[in-house]
Each structure stands twice: as C-alpha cells, then as structure tokens.
Amino acid sequence: MMLALEMYRSLPRYIAARAVGGRVPGILTGPAAPVRLVNRAEPRTSAPGWARVKPILSGICGSDLGALFGQTSMYFSALVSMPFVPGHEVVGELVDDCEDLPAGTRVVLDPVLSCAARGVERCQSCASGQTNRCDRITVGHVSPGLQTGYCADTGGGWGGQLMAHRSQLHAVPDGLSDERAVLVEPLACAVHTAMRAQVPDGGSVLVSGAGAVGLFATLALRELTPAGRISVVAKHPRQRELARAFGATDVLAPDEVPARVRRATQAFRLTPERSGEFLLGGVDVGIDAVGSKDSLGTTLRVTRAGGRVVLSGMPAAGADLSPVWFRELEVVGAYATQGREAFARALDLAASAPLDGVVGGRYPLYRWREALDHAHSAGRLGTVKVAFDLRSSR
Amino acid sequence: MSRPGFVLEVDDRTPPLVVHDGEGFRLEKFPLGTRVVYSPESQPGLRDVDAAIRHALEQPENSEPLRALLRPGMRLTIAFDDVSLPLPPMKRPDIRQRVVEQVLTMAAEAGVDDVEIIAALALHRRMKPSELQHALGERVYRSFAPDGLLYNHDAEDPDNLEFIGTTDQGEEVEINKRAAQSDLLVYVNINIVPMDGGHKSVPIGLASYRSLRHHHNSKTMVHSRSFMDHKKSAMHHSAWRMGRLLKDHLKIFTIETTLNNDVFPAPYDFLNKREWEWNVRDQATMLAAKRGLAVAPSKLRRKIFQGIQAPYGITGVHAGETEAVHEKTLAKVYSQQAVEVQGQSDVLIMGVPYLCPYNVDAVMNPILATCMGLGYFFNSYRNKPVVRPGGAVILYHPVPYEFSQLHHPSYVDFFEEVLAESTDPATIEQRFEKQYATDPWYIHLYRTSYAYHGVHPFYMWYWAAHAMDHVGDVVWVGADRRAVERMGFRSASTLADALEMVSGTVGRSPSITYTHNPPHLISDVR
C-alpha cells in the first residue's frame, strides 16, 4: 500500500470547481476538493518494458490545477481514466531494472503514454517519432490516459510509487540535483514550444504569461532559437526578474501589451468599438503561455499578419478568432514533447540555466491543501514551481 | 534696484497669495521673508492696431516696404505662428488675422495671385479648421482653405521639404519647399515671451526633424542660459546660424507683434491684480471661483479654463529684416515682462497653470507640467537663474496621470516606457529618440490626425534639462505621487511639507523666491 493523492469522479465537486474554482481556490483545496489523500494499492503491470519508479520530487503543473479547478475542457474527459493519481513532472528512482537502466537509476519521465508504452503497433505519429501526437492513447496494456498522471493504472507523481515504460524514461546525470531534475519535463515542453514557434532570424516574440510555462519557454527561445526581441508579459515582480534572467529583452505588464508591442515593432494601433485594441503589424511570433481567454485574445491581436501563434498553455474557449482570419495567422499547438531530443536538450538546460530557487515550495503529501493553495497563487507569492517531496511522504 | 512694487517681501501684513495650480488656484500663506516677484503692470495697448500694422509694413526695419517687394507673377507665401501661441488664446480678432489681412490686401493690390498660407507648426499638432479660422479670421479662412491654399506645415512630407544647406557648424537646414521656393516669405509672429521670434520663426517653425534635431537636443538645452535670452541660448545660436544661411537663399519679411499682460478676462481679471489691491468684489469673486472650481467635475473645470480667451492689448508691431525686427521686439517684451531681482535664492517656488503651448484643448500631462515648470518658468530669467545652483524648486500642479490619446499618443509611451528606464535627458536621447522620431504610427498620426510628433515628448523633457542639471531638488505640491515619482521627482501635500523635504538640500532657513506668474515675467537676476 502507498500514500497517494487521488483525483476521483464527483459531479457536484466538478460543478463547484467550474463555478467558483478560479475565484475561491480555498474551497477547492478544502472541503470541495475532487482530490483526496488515500492509502491505495501500488500500481502494477506485468507487460514488458515497464518498471516501478519511486518519485522523489513531483511538480504541480498548471494543467493539474486546471483539472482540479474545473477549468479543463470536457474534450479531455475521454482521454483520462478515473480515479487517477496526478503528477507527471517527476524525478524518481527506478525500483526495478528496466531494460538497459538498472534499478536505482535516477530518472525523469516523459509522461506521454504512446504506442510503445501501450504495447500496440505504432501509429503513424509514433512511427515518425512524434509520440506526443499518438493516436492510440486509449487502448493497449493500460487504461485510457493521455499521460502518466491522468491514467488509472500507472499511478502518478503525487503518490509513493508509479509504473513507467522504458520509452518514457530518461536517466538523470549524476551532477544534476533533484530540484533541477524535476524541471526537466516542463523544460522539455518549453523546448518543444520553442521549436514549434519557428522563429525567423532576429524575429520578435511575445510570450504571454510568466508562470513556469512562459518562463521556461522564454529560456528555450533564447537558448535554442535565433529570436531577436523577446517580450514577456509578467504580472509579478519575481516573474519579471526571472523573465529577464531567462533571456527576455523586455517585460510588460498585461495592460501594457498593445502599447509596448506597438512601440517595439512600430506597428499601427487601432481601437475597435467595445473590444480590445489590436495592431496592424506586431510580433512575428506570439506564444500564449497562460491559456486564458484574455491572454490568447491579446496574443492574437498583437501578432503580425502571417505570423505564428503557439498555444503553449492549455487553451481556454471563447477567444475572438477574427485576427486569425483577417491577419492570416498560423495558430499551432505545442503539446508535451516530441521524442527524445527535446528531453536531451532539456537536460542540458536544466544543468546550465539559472534555475536555482525555481522550485520555491516543497511539501509532503499530507500537506497537499497547502501545496495546492501555494501553487495556485505561485506567481503572486514569487514562486515558479511548487513540488511534492515524496521522500518525506513515505 | 528692483522696480518698486514688483518685488515684495512677505511680512505679517501680507495676505495669502494666489498660486496657480493646474485647473485651479490656491491661496498660500508664504513664510515670512519670502521674496515674491510679480509681473510688471500691464502696459497700455496700441490705440489703433491696424494703423500700427500699416505703418510697420510701409516703414519696415532694414528693408524695403512690403509693397515694394510685391509684384505680379511672384510666389508669395505667408507663414504664421501656430496654435501654441498666444497663451491663453487671444480674443477675436487675433493679431495674426489683422496682419495677414493687410498683407493680403497689399498683395492683391500689387497683382500677386500665387499666394499660400502655412501654419508654421514644426512638429506640433496640426491646427484644426476652427483654430485656423480663429487665428486668421473667417474671411481669410474661407478664401484660402477650401482651395488648399491655407494649410498646416507637414514636417514629414518628403515631397514638400527642401534641403537648403549646412551651416558652418554642420547643422542641416531643411524647410518647407513652398516657403523655400517662394519669391517672398512673409512670417507673422506673436511674441509672447522673448524666446519666440527672430530666427526661431522660419528655421524652426517650417523645419523638419532632420533640421530640428541639431538644436532640440539635450546637450544644447543644458547649455542654454536661458531660452529667454537668445544671446546666451545655445538653441538660439543654432537657429541664428540656420536663419543666416536661409537668408542667403530666401527673401524673408518678418512681422513680429508684442502683447501686454492682460491675460485674464472678466470675471477672472482679479488675477491680473496683486492680492492686497483686491477690492471686496475681487475677493468675493476669488472665493466663489475657488469654491466653485473645487466642487466642479474635472471635465467642466477643463472646459471653463480652456474656454478662457485673453483680452490682450497689442503693444508693438515691427516688420522688415528678421534680426532688426527682433531687436525692437525684444526691447518691447522686456519692457513689459522684465523685473529686476537682486541675487539668487535657495528655493524657487512656482505655480504651474492649466495651460502650456502644447496642451491647447487637452489635459496638461505630467511631461508638459514639467516642461512648463522646469522648462518655461524656470528659464524665465536673464543673467542667471532665480535659484542658486544646487538649490530647490517647489512647483504647484496636480500633475494628473492622464494623457490625451488624440494629441499626445507618443507621450503616453514615453512616460510608460522611456521614463521607466531613465530620466536622464542624454541617456534617453541616445537610447530612444530615434525610435520615436521615426515610428511610422506616430508619423501617421502627426500627419493625418491631431497628434504631436513622436519625438515631441523628448523635446519637452530636454526643455527641463537645464533646470534638472542646475537644481538639487524638485518637489511638487499636491501632485499625483505616482506621476511625479516616474519622473524622478517627489511630491508633498503642503508647502510646509515641501520645505521640510528640501531642507536636506537647502537647510531649515532657506531664502525663498516665489515668482507670481502668469502673466509672464522675466526675472532679471543681478
């Protein structure tokens, strides 16, 4: 048996989450939480290539909070199996030998449960190495679940043990601390975002949002692309500081975006009736790293004609898509990571980037309410990443 | 020795004094011993202005009469000072109308039919049709504007600019093509302060950014002592060099006019008097105005103030060769505005009113309030500043964190972006000026809407560079704290607090001078 946080199906709690989740987060980490701390059986599977992993640190991702607070689209309801143990940003230790990786190896997890993990014939995407686009994520050895942390069979990072397939595992170099290693998965996503952005030489980029997704995207853009000016939209002082440290050319407050982007790109600015300002001209690439209606709307309105908008945060519904049509924008998603290369780059970034102090809160599982509260208010409190420390939870 | 009555030392019997405070007034009790400098009595205006204009045109300074310069088939261009002058706007008929009408009459009599009239606005906003009509009168407006013969200078129209040449100091001179290619350019000026007129009219009023950047820059502004004395102003030296170069290429006939100090019409005319001379009616009016303004909504207050038109008297009209005319003009202006002040003081106090040359019909934003206080009023001296080097300046103005998007779009960005990085004029000039000057959106708004040019807020900031370089401390009384902090200044609630705040710079018993304007005054510091 192991201690784990479990998310379970509860219609009243789901409705409560949708209704008040964003405004009164305390209710959702309190009595109305669709998550509970339980003692449950450790996950098991006898399929080839699978091994047990004991998580050391497991991060709390924005998508986890989205699911908890009822902000996630019902689109995803067919892609998860309940109840599940959340947590997909994991650094852990192998309990069993796993093909070429001996027991005791420190690993980080590529959470996508693709064809290889499911033991099915590889789909077209997996065959081409784009495992994040796998079409088989509801079949095979394990229950439906797009990722570890959303699947009833595999367990997740917010529990004492999980199961992982060799295709998901990446060994952590000895010199890399656990606090940096737990950031490898979100960094790999950021690397993927940077690649999806296809920034032209010296191109201007707007990163809307300076939570973990936005900050890591900034870092990856600066390190891996020929981007020129990178403008980051940040609300809080610590976010502004980190955005600059991670390579932002300038940092904007949310209400300054149209004016500052206009200035930087020498665009023309228009104010329609009863709607937000927009630009004729603007940045070459916009990255929405928040996923809110406002953030996506702003990003679409300040990207130049023919520019590219990358949805890096899990997107919300309701943004006005007029600019996509009128400005002929290319809107692309950036979900998880594409194969092993992104993880290799993320491991390099984790080793070299100024990431000390980025994991700003570590909580044992039994203090989960505090941890989720902290994660929900992380930006305001000057924290980038909150993580569960599973060593102190066993 | 000071002219009796114009410099007062506050004693026990001195009543509270009026201090202009944006769209309102304060009655302030100054510390005993404060020196108060009042503008001189308003001089009587000319009894027959039209005759004076006629006389100036027929017997000009150092030039043939205007009539002799006019001939059939010639290209005649008339340029005139834009909406930034005078302050407040003049009651109809505006002196520009009176002068232009006479010039046009003479031109018609001489058979000149190729005439164009240009508002010499440099990088200021374009004048609206109603403003053109106010300045030149309905007859001139209706005769020329519909045919496109009365228009605003466009400093960003490459097809209508002409490069004249380079001065011996390497300054490029580029002005309006129509003016440059005319057989005669007549320039009609209103000289409200000694900074205006002379070679500041054509080489600046009809110039492009390419030309203006040679003198409107932080280095020149810091080295101008003061703008009100063209012989000591680096900016004017540059304009004079340009003007002399222009003189070799273009026949210019300058007409300059001077005004008296009748700035406030009834019922605000008590503001033209000194407080101890107020009768019961004046006191009652002041009380009513002060109370009424205090409770009036800001829109109404702005409407009241922006609606004020001054009943100026015209004190002089001079015409002819630019430099000879300007000598006469300056003598007139100084005779109206100069006040002898003995020695510098530790603290200079100034009330900044609701209006400056660049916010006609708009809110006075923080940059303009600074320009008015530390640019215009601080520089209203001859010889040396009223405040000693390293002294303190205390200003009254609410400094609202508010901008007109119509008139001042680049100001908003300048305030939010540039001043957040640095308030040092040289630094911001080097890092940001070119970007703003060449920004196509600002250029578009300058050319097609009623926006000041993108570079204009930089110029306004440079205007204050000399004061910022000279004094040790600047405190605003009653100002929006956020707005003044962004500009690197401090804010106090009361004069007592402000004096307390500057005591670190000037001590606890500083000598204080309060310059009581408007109306305009020039402190002649000995």
Image (tube, helix red, strand yellow):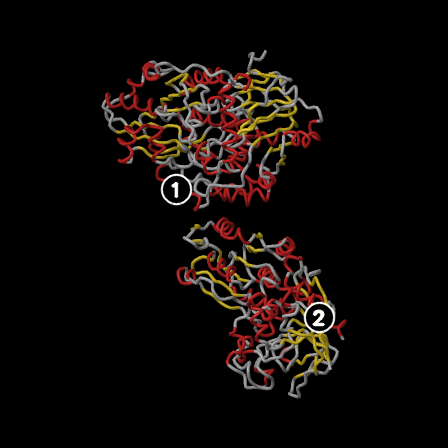
Query: Vertical placement of B326 versus A21: above or below?
Result: above
Residue in front for this viewpoint, A234 or B294: B294
Q: From the viewer's perspective, is A187 left or right of B518?
A: right
Mark 1 is on which residue type? Ser
**Quadrant of the rendered image containing residue B445:** top left
Q: Which residue is mark 2?
A: A57
Query: Vertical placement of B517 versus B422: above or below?
Result: above
Q: Position of residue B107 (x, y in %)?
A: 27, 23
Whether residue B444 is visible here, answered yes or no, is yes
Q: From the viewer's perspective, is B11 left or right of A257?
A: right
Q: CA distance from mark 2 to mark 1?
A: 59 Å
Mark 2 is on which residue type? Leu
- Chain letter for mark 1: B
Graded by Cα atoms within 10 Å as few (under 14), some (14 to 19) or many (20 or more), the crowding at tag 2 reads: many
**Quadrant of the rendered image containing residue A281:** bottom left
Q: Which mark is residue B449?
A: 1
Query: Vertical placement of B525 versus A187: above or below?
Result: above
Q: Position of residue B484 (x, y in %)?
A: 59, 38
Task: Say which element carries label 2.
Answer: strand
Residue in front for this viewpoint, A369 or B452: A369
